[in-house]
Image (cartoon, rainbow, N blue to C red):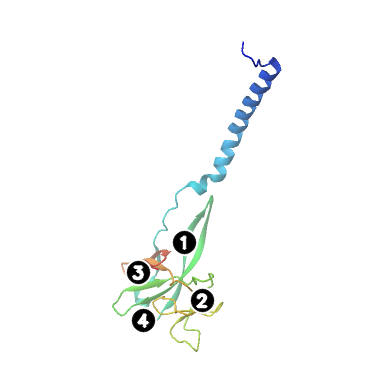
Amino acid sequence: MSKEDISRRQFLNYTLTGVGGFMAAGMLMPMVRFALDPILKEGTDQEMVAVTSVEELANEPKRFDFKIKQKDGWYESDVTQSAWVYKAKNGDVIALSPICKHLGCTVDWNTDPSHPNQFFCPCHLGRYTKDGTNVKGTAPLAPLDVYDSQVKDGKLYLGKAKPRKGA
């Protein structure tokens, strides 16, 4: 026998505590997994959505609204998004997010009389040039996000808005 004998009562106490802890972990684990599962899953890229006909595009930015399917955890919904779209001089289609990079307000095209032909954010007087570059000295510290875009069969398809490379 060892110097420190365990009484029968202590042995039962340790055994029941261990078994109880094991059973509690077995009951809690599925609940924890259920709560964390959506967070642990990899996000899927947004599918390209048809927004407009290429014929409708001009050199001046025009706002287009479109719907995407969004999944938040277990909830799926249709969400309306917007894009400022125009054709550049070289013929490329440019699609910019209307969300200001300062505090997330919505920017408008050519609405500030003192600064024509710029995107303007009325929340904190932020401004962007036509290509989405933030004007130095105004609130935004980064350019507008650019949508993944693709022209197919005369239609413009937009994907997810992403920050510009090097921004």
10 Å crowding of disc 4: few (<14), some (14-19), many (20+)? few
The residue labelled by disc 3 is: 155
Badge 1 element: strand
The residue labelled by disc 1 is: 68
Foreground disc of the pair 3, 4 = 4
What's the amino acid at mark 1? Ile
What's the amino acid at mark 2? Ala
Badge 2 element: loop
**Could you tell me how far apart the alpha carbons at marks 2 and 1 are, in whole angstroms?**
30 Å
**Could you tell me how far apart the alpha carbons at marks 2 and 4 are, in whole angstroms?**
26 Å
10 Å crowding of disc 3: few (<14), some (14-19), many (20+)? some
**Could you tell me how far apart the alpha carbons at marks 4 and 1 are, in whole angstroms?**
26 Å
**Could you tell me how far apart the alpha carbons at marks 1 and 3 are, in whole angstroms?**
16 Å
Query: Which quadrant of the structure image shows residue 36?
Result: top right
- Residue 67, given in percent of the width and then of the height, sits at 47, 64
Q: Using the image, tell me which numbered label, if any, was put on residue 139.
A: 2
The residue labelled by disc 4 is: 59
Label 1 vs 3, first from the N-terminus: 1
Query: Residue at (39%, 71%) from the top-left corner?
Result: 95
Work out whether residue 93 or residue 154 is closer to the camera in this orientation and state it: 93
Q: Is residue 152 left or right of residue 126?
A: left
